[in-house]
Image: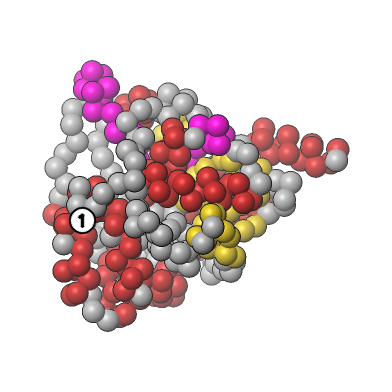
Amino acid sequence: MTNAPPTIIPPTSVAVREGHRLAVRRGGPATGVPLLLLHGFPCTSLIWSHALGPLAEAGFDVAAPDLRGYGGSDFAPDGFYDFAAFNADLVGLLDALGWERAVVAGHDLGAMVAIDLANRHPERVDRLVVLDDSMPDLPDAFAAAGIPPGRPKPAVYDYQRRQGRHADELLAELDTPERRRRYVAEFYGHRMWCPPDAFDDADLALLTEPYADADRLRASFADYEVVMGTRPMSAPELIDRPVRQRTLVLIGADQVTLGDHIPERCAIAFPEAVGPFWVPDCGHFMPWEKPTVVHRAITSFCGDLLAGAASGASGA
């Protein structure tokens, strides 16, 4: 690991609807550009710990929530963990923070939630930042452009089947806090989602701690159940159309999770794309592995917004 130890900002509890609250890490000036940071699996908002402070210093009003069921946030009051359900919470969060619109950045599950949010509530998303090769699912458009279907997933993806189809049996095997944390740590290690030296023991102790709780780990499997069709959805997921907002796409080159023909797919999925740009010596967890790249790229991508916010603040 090359990063200095992160500054951990304690979360605050924010009511996003009556009786339902999200844990949210905050930073930056109230007059700054609203920036929503969304984590993926097997993370929580802690994955943004290296980048949140610099983004706040750059002039963003930053909010990094734990998605429902993750970290310190409430479990789903309705049992749903699909994109529409996540985004019902996030729209409530935007309202609670007094944000009409926000720049939304995400990776992994968080990137897909962000894509759904941009399509479901386009009036609330100013710009999008995607920190991996997540993109809308457009098989007909890809085929029409001569892009072949993706490759079958390698054996390293066995977790998808187990978490999506046999979640309770898997959880029964992970019957102690230590076993649950060790299982989560595998995604930062031998599953090759990132370079082998990207996380040290202190990093893993911090990032896996939320998953010592069996209910938290079980909730994190729910998205895989949605993907596998073993859990119902609250509404159809809106990832079947291109994203119309300007989208910055950064991809870590050093991970086994990458698909094929990414630039060609990206051009169709994100017609207003900036990128994709490949970040060398970086795996799947870019907010932690390359926080300087992340905060400088987002700051540059939103430079005009930041200048406008600074001008408005100085004229107030």
Residue 304: image quadrant is: top right
- Mark 1 highlights which residue? 164
Is residue 134 rendered to the left or right of residue 244? Answer: left
Q: Which residues are magenta?
A: 122-146
Is residue 315 rendered to the left or right of residue 310? Answer: right
Q: Residue at x 23, y 28 (%)?
A: 139
Q: Residue at x 23, y 75 (%)?
A: 174
Q: Residue at x 37, y 45 (%)?
A: 83
| Residue that extends furthest to the top in the rendered view of this protein | 144
* Front position in the image: 267 or 38: 38
Residue 277: image quadrant is: top left
- Residue 165 spot, x, y in % from top left: 16, 57
Q: Quadrant of the N terminus?
A: bottom left
Q: Quadrant of the C terminus?
A: top right
Q: Is residue 107 visible?
A: no
* Front position in the image: 81 or 305: 81
* Front position in the image: 288 or 95: 95
